[in-house]
Image (tube, helix red, strand yellow):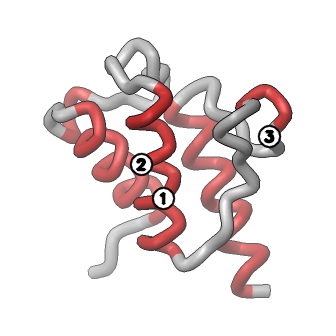
Amino acid sequence: MSDTVKDQVLRIIADQAVLEVSDVTMDSTLEGLGIDSLGLVEAIFAIEEAFDIQVPFNANDPSESDFDISSVAAIVTAVEGLVAEQKA
């Protein structure tokens, strides 16, 4: 059975935070997981590669991005939306 988008995003975020996937919850924030701006950029690249999507994220000005990184749940939702758009 293939992983869900959520499973893959959680694994990517856990890798960046050097944590176990079980330590990453949907309520977690990247900051709370200890992921800095460089880790965030690396996570975004990993997500783009894993799902073959373009994430609308501006690393120089994250607040200007259409990509919600306020929590793990928000990132999963955003990635699911991008994957669905790409398949459409």
Residue at 29% x, 40% y is 16
Q: What is the x, y in percent for residue 41?
A: 50, 44
SS for tag 2? helix
SS for tag 1? helix
Residue in the foreground of this view, choosing between 22 and 63? 63
As drawn, the label of residue 42 is 2
Residue at 51% x, 74% y is 51
Give the answer, above or below, for where 14 lies relative to 76: above
Residue at 63% x, 36% y is 74
**Contact flag, marks 1 and 2 (Cβ < 8 Å):** yes
Q: What is the x, y in percent for residue 86?
A: 73, 80
User: As shown in the figure, which amino acid type bears the numbered disc 1?
Assistant: Phe
Give the answer, above or below, for where 67 lies relative to 86: above
Residue at label 1? 45
Q: CA distance from mark 3 to mark 1?
A: 15 Å
Give the answer, above or below, for where 43 lies relative to 54: above
Residue in the foreground of this view, choosing between 52 and 59? 59
For the residue carrying disc 3, how many other residues have a C-alpha within 10 Å: few (<14), some (14-19), or many (20+)? some
Residue at label 3? 65
Quadrant (top left, top right, bottom left, bottom right) of the C terminus: bottom right
SS for tag 3? loop
User: As shown in the figure, which amino acid type bears the numbered disc 2?
Assistant: Glu
